[in-house]
Image: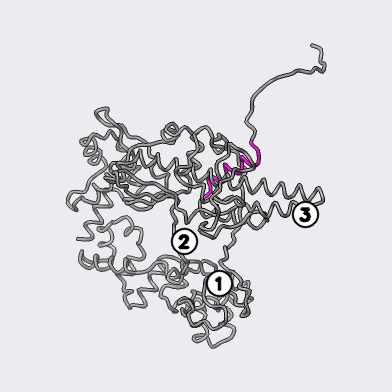
Amino acid sequence: MTLAQRLDLRQSQALVMTPQLQQAIKLLQLSNLELTDYVERELEQNPLLERDEGDGADRPAEGLGIDGDPDAPAVGPSSDRLDTMTLSSADTLPASGESPLDANSDDGNLWSSNEAAAGGEEFDGGESLTWKTSGGRGDFEDEEGGFDRTLSAEKTLSEHLSEQIGIDFADRTERLIAAYMVGLLDECGWFTADCGTVAEALLCPVERVEAVLARLQRLDPPGIFARSLKECLALQLREKNRLDPAMQAMLDNLHLLANRDLAGLRKICGVDNEDLADMVAEIKALNPKPGEAFARDIAQTLVPDILMRPSADGGWHVELNSDSLPRVLVNRRYYAEVSRIARRREDKDYLSEQFQSASWLVKSLHQRATTILKVATELVRQQDGFFRQGVEHLRPLVLRDIADAIGMHESTVSRVTSNKYISGPRGVFELKYFFSAAISAMDGAAAHSAEAVRFRIKTLIEAEQASDVLSDDKIVEILQGDGIDIARRTVAKYRESMRISSSVQRRREKALRL
């Protein structure tokens, strides 16, 4: 066969993922915190973007499309600025075929974002030159300062131990060794390093390091500087003067306690049932992680993306949480003023690029909000039984069910339900929670949700008596009697996923409580 060059004309179709479309898709799967961080970065980089902190009451009631496109959605009541909040209502939902976010793309191009705090400050240019903030007065006479300013800072574990070391250790060298060893504690307060390594690092004898460690183990809180669970519990029992031979024998056989082997423990410790129960109660009252008492990490409050409440007609009213939506706008007036004085081509190209980027971001945020609202509304409609009657009425659901109902692709629904939360009468749930596998029914009727079956198994185990502990086979028999076709290995898998011990261990534990 002769090799030769040849020109062919072919016609084909392909989906082109433009940077703007990639941005819109990535915005869809961001959580509200990640989205806020991303928008903050864009506000720093784009001079035409502004944060909308007003209520919009002073704006003229005039709509304006994006980039002069007559088919684009109305973008707010201002003729100068494009506001994302005015685009995020239920009556602005686009048709299923109009969503630029509905694309089947699983590429790995991620949009990163950086943390930035939003300021609430303004400058009053009067004679007093007072700097006004949302935190109090600015004239350095803060008579109405926040209550949080009067609170003292909480001590860390390192500070708490350092104070005791300064009092208990008179020798300067031992204080230095002790301070070095404080830095080697983990979050639980355990000493995970080796004394030989510490001695080598500080160029001192190992015996001296071990002597310092023994003194450190007597500091507060009890159990600090332990090197194992057994040593941690022993230090606390010694502090209470309860480390007798029987208790030491139990600490030497903690694996039997974990397996609820009461007979073996009674034989090893040489005690009766009553004494054994008291010893186990003492062990349970101890703190295996004494250092965590000083871990004062501020818990991040979960902010839902969607709010739902009962409506007057007996249905549900679903809306987006406006507090979690970033409010940004495009300042068209500033763009027009700067464009008139721009002379160089590079300046005009830069302004045009920034304007297009800002306009697309506003449109993408609007599209993200309306897509989330559309998916959430359909999800609430299909899981109506759960919100009215509880988890036992959670129906089996997959992404395709929602996608087919609203005319979108499964990948779009998957992105919408990732890291998004809904707040309703039964609490705050991740949207992914409502998607559950189906377990067939015995009579061929409607299938049962796997989550509902888990709840049923948990309810049965919690209601069991000490004299009648349910085995997995017995649970299968009960569930099949209720019309749920389930295998024993499935019951065991669900039970283990809920961290519920086996029937043998539960029987030992209930006997121990008696």
Q: Secondary structure at mark 2?
A: loop
Label 2 or label 1, whichever comes before in sequence order: 1
Q: Reading the chain from its start, which is encountered first: label 3 or label 1?
A: 1
Disc number placed over residue 133 in the picture, else none: 1
Quarter of the rendering occupied by the N terminus: top right
Observer-nearest of 370 and 463: 370
Looking at the picture, tell me which residue is in the foreground, 306 or 330: 330
- Could you tell me which secondary element the residue under label 1 belongs to? loop
Circle 1 crowding by C-alpha within 10 Å: few under 14, some 14–19, many from 20: few
Look at the picture and state if 204 lies above or below 283: below
As measured in the structure, the alpha-carbon distance from the residue carrying label 2 to the one carrying label 3 is 47 Å
The residue singled out by tag 3 in the image is 341
Is the residue 66 above or below the residue 300 in the image?
above
Query: How many residues crowd around disc 3 within 10 Å: few (fewer than 14), some, or many (20 or more)?
Result: few
Q: Which residues are magenta?
A: 17-30
Of tags 3 and 1, the one toward the viewer is: 3
Gap in Å between the C-alphas at discs 2 and 1? 24 Å
Q: Which residue is mark 2?
A: 300
Q: Is residue 351 above or below residue 211?
A: above
